[in-house]
Amino acid sequence: TYMAALALTRNKWLSLVVSLLAGVDPVMRALSSIALLDAHVAMFSAMSIYFLFSRKPVCALITVIVGSLFKFNTLFLLIPVLYILVRLDFTENPKFTVLVRSLIKYSFATLSLFLAFQVIASIPLIIHGGFDWWFSSSITGAFKWHLSVKCFGAHCPVSSAPWDWFIGNNGFTLYYFTGTRSLVAIGFWPLWSIALAY
């Protein structure tokens, strides 16, 4: 985070403040303390943003793909990465055909890299259960899981929408301690709201 902020602002003190704010954000501390994969998503997101600000969009693309090995949420960063890659080509040659060709080229490269990295990292699982089983459980199953509602009814735990985190409305309870204490994932909402607006 420090390096990404430094690449953007060229200000060491501001970059230090930004990285400290990220480090003490309550949601990052809560999610990291119980070993959820969101800390890995944050790390690879920060690395990808650093590469974008350092004008290395191909490195940013590869970093996003590697981050997706931990959790598919990292793939959301493909939106700015692909936008910048396509924009670079289009700026060089501002024609509609270049825009379309560049979009197809980088989309195909991204999909190919994503599948190649997933297969390489999953060789033991593929050997154990077969390619079809692995693909349906690890790729299509993961996308289905991420795009579905996990629980219906009164017996479900309290849910929390991501936009609630931005306004400090409804945190996601991760763990109940004895008594009245609990570990809740909720960010420092004034900072999150400013970041979202910016």
Image (tube, rainbow, N blue to C red):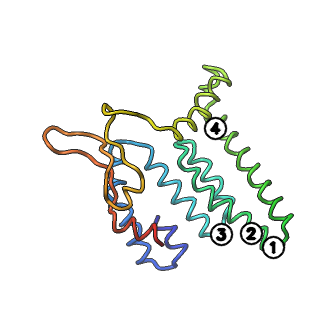
The x and y percentages for residue 68 are: 57, 45
Give the amino acid type for the residue marked by disc 1 in the picture.
Glu
Cβ–Cβ below 8 Å for labels 3 and 1?
no
Give the amino acid type for the residue marked by disc 3 in the picture.
Arg
- Which of pointers 4 and 3 lies earlier in the amino acid sequence? 3
Mark 3 element type: loop
Mark 1 element type: helix
The x and y percentages for residue 88 are: 74, 69
Q: Is residue 24 left or right of residue 9?
A: left
State how far apart marks 3 and 1 are (Cα).
Answer: 15 Å
**x 17%, y 45%: residue:** 181
State how far apart marks 1 and 4 are (Cα).
Answer: 33 Å
Residue assigned mark 1: 92
Residue assigned mark 3: 55
State how far apart marks 4 and 3 are (Cα).
Answer: 26 Å
Q: Is residue 58 depicted above or below 134 in this figure?
A: below
Q: Is residue 98 depicted above or below 122 in this figure?
A: below
Give the amino acid type for the residue marked by disc 2 in the picture.
Leu
**x 38%, y 60%: residue:** 166
Mark toward the viewer: 1 or 4: 1
Give the residue furthest to the front: 153
Q: Is residue 3 depicted above or below 101 in this figure?
A: below
Residue assigned mark 2: 88
Mark toward the viewer: 4 or 2: 2
Cβ–Cβ below 8 Å for labels 2 and 1?
yes
